[in-house]
Image (cartoon, grey):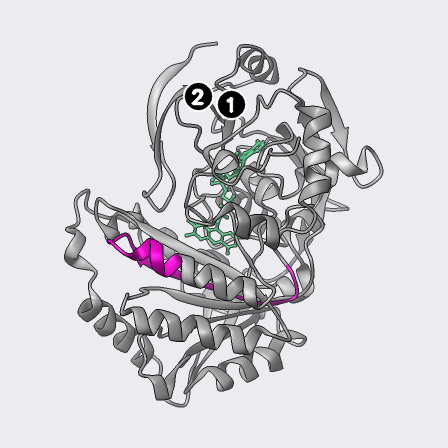
Amino acid sequence: MNWKRVELGGWGRTAVAEMLAARPERLGEVQRALAQVGEEGLVVRGGGRSYGDAALNGGGRVLLTERLDRILAFDEKTGELVVEPGVTFGELTRLFLPRGYIVPVTPGTGFATIGGAVAMDVHGKNHDWAGSFGDHVLWLDLLLPSGQVVRVSPGERPELFLATIGGLGLTGVITAISMRLMHTPAQGVTVRETRVADLDAMLAELHQHRSTSTFSVAWIDAQAPARSLGRGIVEIADPAPEDSRFETAPRRRTMPKHVPSAFLNSVSVRLFNRWYSRRIAPEGRQRSLSFERFLYPLDSVLEWNRLYGRRGFFQFQCVLPDKDGPAGLKQLLETVAKSRRASFLSVLKTLGREGRGHLSFAQRGYTLALDFPRRSGTDVLLALLERVVLDHGGRVYLAKDAALSRHGFAAMYPKLDRFRAVLHEVDPEGRLTSDLARRLAIRAGT
Ligand SMILES: Cc1cc2nc3c(=O)[nH]c(=O)nc-3n(C[C@H](O)[C@H](O)[C@H](O)COP(=O)(O)OP(=O)(O)OC[C@H]3O[C@@H](n4cnc5c(N)ncnc54)[C@H](O)[C@@H]3O)c2cc1C
């Protein structure tokens, strides 16, 4: 296998690493690559859309899945699809929507791969009824560090299956995924946007639509004054009638290579938030959007992560359980406001239930995502936010994380011991690894 020295980063560009990379095209090449891995370890990398260090392995090896991107089988009657791990959500939407099928759970970017979605057990804007991505997986083919390929599913090696869903790529290289696509006659959605005055109103609006609407998501103005804490816009969407005319995604543009770090400051973010909120008339608005435009709003600006300048940015995403959620969210927003650090895009969604994987992120409650440019002191703010999440029984999402503490991680993921037991069995030497796994001591105790 040909290994090439590369420098790669997480999507937030705060974590960067030098590694030896291979780009296999066939399963045999993946097996040969894995056989060459020694103590330096190997990480698998899909679309590189994790924000932190989950797909990095500084000083070690990385296996890029971009050429493992074949559709292996599709049953038109049942919707059962089998793909290689490097296939992206964007590609599946493009290929299957015209045939009346859609992936039931998709993250907010079409550039994420199906392998990456399994390894993070991702969620979409429809978690209350659709659950997480892993809930739709029928089986996986997994190349174990031993070189053996095994099929895992809820019925075959179930403990390994549950460790692999949301398993951060540490149990093996996922080489094939079988899932069920959902039938949809609609080619887009009808979206209703409503302005809400504060956090209580926002939570009431989201709660009301949890069980009745297909998709829901809210944007929060994290710079609103204290009396309007949590004000923002709630978007509710449902499949549109077949004869609708849809606004499609705008032509793709690319963010300039060098954006000055000072471009996003508290003034520019305040102006953005004000503009964003006032796009919507006080009485709300309704639009019909293509699925691509609705599901992947940021994908029309390629490399938008450069907006934060050379130093990059952190995304902090957590989930707080239903009961303590409102108090926890209030405290999180107050902590951000007090820090005077601008969060440019702040997104709130509801999640319906626990994910099925041992390290799945989802639990029933509210998930809030906040973006912060990396400046001096941002780490202090992130530690304060972690504390609030711990105090309210929540957890931080590892797909977005670059700053969580080991102690926080262990306290937030109660099935960690079961996960470690599986790792001990399938990879006692720790050949599959990542900077995230080392930072959080995920293997400790194995
Ligand atoms: C704009 C944007 C919006 C997003 N919105 C959401 C959202 O709404 N919901 C959500 O849940 N997430 C969201 N994310 C996060 C993203 O969906 C996850 O980080 C996802 O894992 C990215 O997939 P990827 O292919 O880029 O994986 P990578 O970032 O390349 O890797 C992620 C993990 O998957 C592992 N992995 C990848 N391929 C394999 C394989 N074949 N075998 C074993 N392990 C593998 C890697 O080792 C790593 O641990 C968003 C990210 C961005 C940039």
| Residue 333 among magenta residues | no
Q: Residue extending furthest right?
A: 155
Residue under numbered circle 1: 42
Residue under numbered circle 2: 60
Write the residue at 19% across / 67% down.
268
> Percent from the top left, x then y, of residue 105?
61, 54
Please state which amino acid type lies under the numbered disc 2.
Gly
Question: Where on the picture, by quarter, is residue 228?
Answer: bottom left
| Residue 380 among magenta residues | yes
Give the extent of the magenta segment.
Answer: 363-382
Q: Is residue 173 above or below residue 251?
A: above
Q: How many marks?
A: 2
Q: Nearer the viewer, residue 342 or 74?
A: 342
Please state which amino acid type lies under the numbered disc 1.
Leu
Q: Secondary structure at mark 2?
A: loop
Q: Is residue 17 above or below residue 198?
A: above
Q: Nearer the viewer, residue 424 or 228?
A: 424
**Is 203 displayed left or right of 380 in the figure?**
right
**Is 113 displayed left or right of 323 in the figure?**
left
- 10 Å neighbourhood of mark 2: few (<14), some, or many (≥20)? many
Q: Quadrant of the C terminus?
A: top right
Q: Is residue 3 above or below residue 287?
A: above
> Percent from the top left, x then y, of residue 247?
40, 65
Write the residue at 50% across / 18% down.
24
Q: Nearer the viewer, residue 284 or 324?
A: 324
